[in-house]
Amino acid sequence: MGQSDRYTVHPVSTADGGGAWGVRDDDTWEIESRHMSRSDAEARAEAKNNGKTRA
């Protein structure tokens, strides 16, 4: 505890000009899991930060 979260929720522009959410790896700046709702992206980031999914 006390360390900052590696995975954060990040807004992503979509091809149709709309907006979506992705999960960014703050170590590499790569955004994965694009085109999710914000709540889905937050849940995925929290799971990854807690080590419950594979990176």
Image (tube, grey):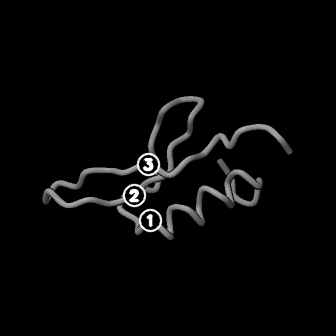
Q: Badges 3 and 2: C-beta atoms under 8 Å apart?
A: yes
* Residue 4 in the image, given as x and y percentages of width and height: 71, 39
Q: Is residue 39 left or right of residue 48?
A: left
Q: Badges 2 and 1: C-beta atoms under 8 Å apart?
A: yes
Q: Name, please, the residue furthest toward the top.
A: 28
Q: Quadrant of residue 37?
A: bottom left
Q: Which residue is mark 3?
A: 10
Sooner in the amino-acid sequence: mark 3 or mark 1: 3
Q: Which residue is mark 1?
A: 38
Circle 3 SS class: strand
Q: Is residue 16 left or right of residue 50?
A: left
Label number found at residue 8: none
Seen at 50% across and 43% down, the residue is: 24
* Residue 47 in the image, given as x and y percentages of width and height: 68, 61
Looking at the image, residue 6 lies above or below residue 11: above
Q: Quadrant of residue 43?
A: bottom right
Q: Which residue is mark 2?
A: 21
Q: Name, please, the residue furthest toward the front.
A: 2
* Residue 7 in the image, given as x and y percentages of width and height: 60, 45
Q: Badges 3 and 1: C-beta atoms under 8 Å apart?
A: no
Seen at 40% across and 65% down, the residue is: 36
